[in-house]
Amino acid sequence: MRAIGEAPAAEPQVIQGADDKASGRDHAVPGAAIEVSGLGHSFGELEVVERLDLSVAAHEALALVGPSGCGKSTLLELIAGLRGPAQGSIRVDGGASEPERLAACAYLPQRDLLFPWLTAIDNASLALRNRGASRAQARAWAQPLFERFGLAGFEDARPRELSGGMRQRVAFLRTLLPGKPVLLLDEPFAALDAITRAEMQEWLADALGAEPRTVVLVTHDVEEALYLCDRVVVLSARPAVALAELSAPTPRALPRPEAVTDPTFVATRERALWAMREGSR
Amino acid sequence: MGDAGGIALIRAREILPPLLIVVGLLAAWEAAAQWDLLADALNIQPFLIPAPSEIAQALWEDRDLLADNGWVTLQEVLAGFALSVVLGAGFAVVLHLSDSLRRAFYPLLVASQTVPIIVVAPILVVWFGFGIGPKLAIIALICFFPITVNTLDGLRSVDQDAIRMMRTLDAGRWQLFRRLEAPSALPYFFSGAKIAVAVAVIGAVFGEWAGSSEGLGHLMLNASAQLLTARLFAAVVILSVFAITLFGLLALLERRIAWWGPRAGNTST
């Protein structure tokens, strides 16, 4: 499998996922299940999440949709281990502590947050560098992904030279490269225009097809949720409780125009929208 | 060719107004000095107010004297500024990394700026002697402060979302500092350093006034005592040239290595 000489000096086991993937060898990244039960969280007086139960199977893609400000982002930060829950428990890949959750989750925030002082490929390979890989090693691991995900030729571009869609692709690769089993995506395309967003949704569907992981996608776009995910949970306004759960009707293999105009898809989208409207009353 | 001509025109438009103002002021000063207008108005001896032409003459005639003493002062400024950068950035990093140290020492750093340098300088000379020691101490005392305050502001205003993201990318404390906090703070550091380098020149002169046998400050004291006003002003010109040149070099360096800063792209110096 992996040549011993390629292993970086520090923490070789952790980096293994990225190494195998970047070297283009077939090695499925293990998915990890997420179990959330009785979760509650508040900022001072403000309750953001209340008695929430969620479960995501390994390699499943779950979307959380809900009105703006309903605590979806907080929920992702809780799962990622960036915050400790006030009540209830969260298990990711069996681990309940915050460091264990941090180790299992990769997090793509709303803004791309690319560092202007780094080139695209150095931004994408930040996690590898943080684990002790040299710049050359990190670039070598990231390189095949740039080619595979339509970014070839932009390795040394500065973030400000890239379009919004390109920046988001680099940010997504940055999330993918650590080789973590769980991807938490927080409204990744909210800032893009409609055409770019549709393109990016197709791109992400392809990328997730090639790199299957356990995915939790937060969005307020029901269509995006149904197109990209296997299951959609509709959340209420703050404090967030689960209002409805829908399974996505069409296999994601269909091209986007056919997928989103499929009658079952349209019907499910309307049911989800209706659930959201009811919930926000 | 059209482009080059256009750029030259834009350059000329940028440079012309300040140039005209400087030339105009110098001409007015020259006229006032030549016809003793200022001296009459202030009711003093005309030789106390040198004309720009006399200052230029002093710059030429005293060039060896100015060069020798200027070199001494320049060395003090450069060494003192380097010391300030190390101390200033070092304090900022330590205070950033430790909340309790910041709470304990920040008031002391502010208090250090209320020390009246001119009064304390002679004591420093008694402590450290007539050499470069007291000059470095005085320059460092004035200059570390803007560097520390600006750098610390930079370190503390790092995007919280970026910090969270770095944690999910397996960054430890050192990686967080090295790859996010330090680059974010670099443009702030340069803001502080540019302020510091201009005051460093004043610090060197204070240090020399308190006790020295060479340097532009020393030269100015002597020239003042001998009423050689043209030489005094010539020394001031050299000091200004130092300050402007060092400031310009720092601005250039900032654009080279901290070009992502909010101001680095359009620094106009």
Image: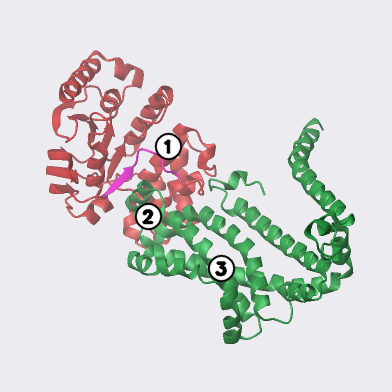
Chain colours: A red, B green
**Image position of A252 with respect to A49: above or below:** above
Task: Give, as a three-letter code, the residue at label 1.
Answer: Arg
Contact between labelled residues 2 and 1, with CB atoms less than 8 Å apart: no
Q: Nearer the viewer, residue B10 or B206?
A: B206
Residue that appears at 20% across and 41% down: A58
Give residue A81's position: percent from left, percent from top.
Answer: 24, 50
Label 3 and label 1 in one chain: no
Task: Check residue A108 for magenta coloring.
Answer: yes
Task: Give, as a three-letter code, the residue at label 2.
Answer: Arg
Give residue B27's position: percent from left, percent from top.
Answer: 84, 49
* Quarter of the figure with residue A157: top right
Give residue A242's position: percent from left, percent from top.
Answer: 14, 32
Q: Residue furthest top?
A: A263
For the residues carrying marks 2 and 3, which lies nearer the camera in this image?
3
Label 1 and label 2 in one chain: yes
Nearer-N-terminus badge (1/2): 2
**Magenta stretch bounds:** A104-114
For the residues carrying marks 3 and 1, which lies nearer the camera in this image?
3
- For residue A169, the mark is 1
Contact between labelled residues 1 and 3, with CB atoms less than 8 Å apart: no
Quarter of the picture holding the N terminus of chain B:
top right
| Label 1 neighbour load within 10 Å: few <14, some 14-19, many 20+ | many
| Label 3 neighbour load within 10 Å: few <14, some 14-19, many 20+ | many
Task: Give, as a three-letter code, the residue at label 3.
Answer: Ile
Query: Regarding mark 2 in the picture, which secondary structure is present there?
Result: loop
Tell me: B188 left or right of A203: right
**Image position of B218 with respect to A110: above or below:** below
| Label 2 neighbour load within 10 Å: few <14, some 14-19, many 20+ | few
Task: Check residue B223 for magenta coloring.
Answer: no
Residue at the spot of label 3: B142
Query: Regarding mark 1 in the picture, which secondary structure is present there?
Result: helix
